[in-house]
Amino acid sequence: MYDNPLTKRQTLTQEVKFSARGVNVFYGDSHAIKGVDVDIEDKTVTAFIGPSGCGKSTFLRCLNRMNDTIDVCRVEGRITLDGEDIYDPRVDPVQLRARVGMVFQKPNPFPKSIYDNVAYGPKIHGMARSRAELDEIVERALRRGAIWDEVKDRLDAPGTGLSGGQQQRLCIARAVATEPEVLLMDEPCSALDPIATAQVEELIDELRQDYSVVIVTHSMQQAARVSQKTAFFHLGNLVEFGETGQIFTNPRDPRTESYITGRIG
Amino acid sequence: MPLFWLVLIVLGLAVAGYVAGRGRALRLAGGDSRVLHSLPSYYGAHVALLTLVPAFAILCLWVLIQPLVIENRISAKLPETAIAESSTRALVMSDVRRVAEGLDVAVAAGAMTADEAAHMRSELTDVRNRLGAVGVALGSDVGPEVLRAAQAYRALAARGHLAMTLVVLTAALGGAGLGIARSRADFRARNVVETAVRYLLIFAATVAILTTIGIVLSLVFNTIEFFKLYPARDFFFGTTWAPSFGGGSELGILPLLWGTFYISLIALAVAVPIGLFAAVYLSEYASGHTRAIAKPLIEVLAGIPTIVYGLFALLTVGPLLIRVFGADGVGIMQAGTAVMTAGLVMGIMLIPFVSSLSDDIINAVPQSMRDGSLGLGATRSETVKQVVLPAALPGIVGAILLAASRAIGETMIVVLGAGAAARLSMNPFDAMTTVTAKIVSQLTGDADFASPEALVAFALGMTLFVITLGLNVFALYIVRKYREQYE
Ligand SMILES: Nc1ncnc2c1ncn2[C@@H]1O[C@H](COP(=O)(O)OP(=O)(O)OP(=O)(O)O)[C@@H](O)[C@H]1O
Ligand SMILES: [Mg+2]
């Protein structure tokens, strides 16, 4: 995993993809994540739920070391991907992020054409040997992002000219174009209409065949629909983690129960 | 009453009017400001405005027009005999004004009573001596007509001044009275003040625009004047610059333009990469702490006066270059003053322009863009090259063009660093000069202002102005074009 080119990744078939132990995150003096232990499995959709500001995004960003870009942010504890510590000094965060893709809370297409937005990752990682191959990758990604039909006639138009929901799906397409092993999605459907939401959920289900997906969502229904595992965060603590069915029907912690029934948050 | 006092009195009236208007509005509202249409201070401001604006408008017009009127009247009364002696009516009038001013000075200094000044006769008194005693030197003896005209001039001016004082004070008082009378509870004072603010802003904008137009017109007229004396073809296509104040000069602009262009090119070649890379480092790589120290340090460069850069070029960079490229070294440099010397130093001067502006522009690129790129597994430099810089490009181009117009307009560094020889040469180690430097030298010589050698300065200035304007238009065009592409 250290500096391996993307194409030569070993495909380990370990059950657990990410394993976090005693993770603490600080923003300066404020303690945003408090001693979180969690195992994220391969070929599984894991949902993070919890009230606003409880640290879902923060924890998600620990998994691909996006927190490195925030000066004041400090991460403690051990997080492993396929058994190897991702905070090990030998790990190149750039390679890690190629393996662990991310869709952000707010759509952030580049000020480039739709085509170039999607081709950005594959080009950087040298995934295509010819223009034709690149075209193929872009089309496949846009189809998986459920946006192909809307943009196939204007691939040269700027990505920033799309509507908010289209932009979000473009960002999803952009993230899947690099074929990551794990896809982190931070509220990917918050700007989408029900039809696009259904398409994205379909995509998530399809991705589950090959990848591990972590999704942050404020919609209980969505968490129940798409995920197999659910983690409930509250004030920086991981309160409860388990089978989605069990969390929603038979929560063990009273805080989980109040949240999913709408009494806190 | 001196003008200064008049202004003070009007201001005092305005303050009193403010207090009175505010007080009256409040009183009529029974002390309850909620009943008023506007806040009490707006009623005050309304009265103050009515006091000030008409009074000052009259004052300004009067001060501008009165001398013209008096001049005309006195000039019309001057007898032909007075003019015959001297050359023209205008020259005699300037004598009259000078004597009148001299009498004023004498009275103010106490060397003469007001009565004496008004009724003195040149046949009886030696006016030139009396005025000379208080420091007013006159070119010749004062004839009786001129003295009488000067006395009439003074009398008219005094009367005009008195009338002005009365009119202005009446206007101020009238305005205040009207304002106070209008200060009733339902009066829309706030809207009046709003209108006044709008006109104030329009006035400021107009002054700025008119000044610009004035400057351009003066350039244009003098340039036309120049082209009447010197063929435009020779000016624009001549390859020799050899002014000689005895006449028969060759005034080709090409060597100067080439110098300007060459020096600016070297300056930009230094400033753009260094400034841009420094900006990228500061905004993308440096920690907040480093940035807080480094950015002001770079900006100090922008605060150094250009004459200091000029000294730096002359005393440090020039000798340094000559040691390497001069006769003892490579042997292609004759003297310390050269295009390279001025270009390098000007480049250093421009670094903060490029870096500071680019830094602001790069910072304005939203963090989410960078996150998006980094999240896809791009390195920082890939992110900068492929996402941040393209997004910031229009602004950066603007910054570079701004630096370019600075370089084109720079004078001091050229005068001290590049030498004064106008020549067309490819060797960057030759001395050359620029358009700006030559404008200075053409106007600081003691040439007659009507000669082509002096007027050429305006043609040079005009050319420079057109070039800079073109550069700005081009910058706007680039910015627009990329904006369309990226939004
Ligand atoms: N860049 C930052 N600097 C300082 N504090 C931060 C930063 N980002 C997040 N925080 C703090 O960390 C805590 C967790 O934030 P986080 O963004 O992870 O919440 P969240 O669960 O994703 O909320 P939401 O559902 O509203 O997106 C919050 O208290 C927030 O104020
Ligand atoms: Mg969040």
Image: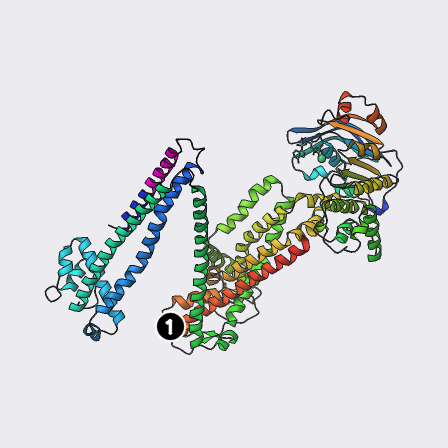
Instruction: Name the dominant secondary structure of the magenta segment.
Output: helix
Q: Is residue B466 left or right of residue B154?
A: right
Q: Residue A265, how many percent across, how many down?
A: 71, 27
Mark 1 is on which residue type? Ala
Chain under label 1? Answer: B
The quadrant where ligand 1 appears is top right
Q: Residue A253, how many percent across, how many down?
A: 78, 21
Front residue of A46 and B268: A46
Q: Residue at x 81, y 30 (%)?
A: A230
Compared with B438, A182 (above or below) is: above
Compared with B317, B81 (above or below) is: below
Compared with B16, A259 (above or below) is: above
Front residue of A232 and B330: A232
Residue A83 seen = no
In what element is the residue under mark 1?
Answer: loop
Q: Residue at x 75, y 53 (%)?
A: A116
Front residue of B395 and B118: B118
- Which residue is identified by label 1? B450
Q: Is mark 1 within 8 Å of ligand 1?
A: no
Residue A77 seen = yes
Q: Is residue B2 left or right of residue A204?
A: left
Q: Residue at x 10, y 65 (%)?
A: B124
Q: Which residues are magenta?
A: B14-28
Q: Residue B156, how many percent across, how many down?
A: 22, 60
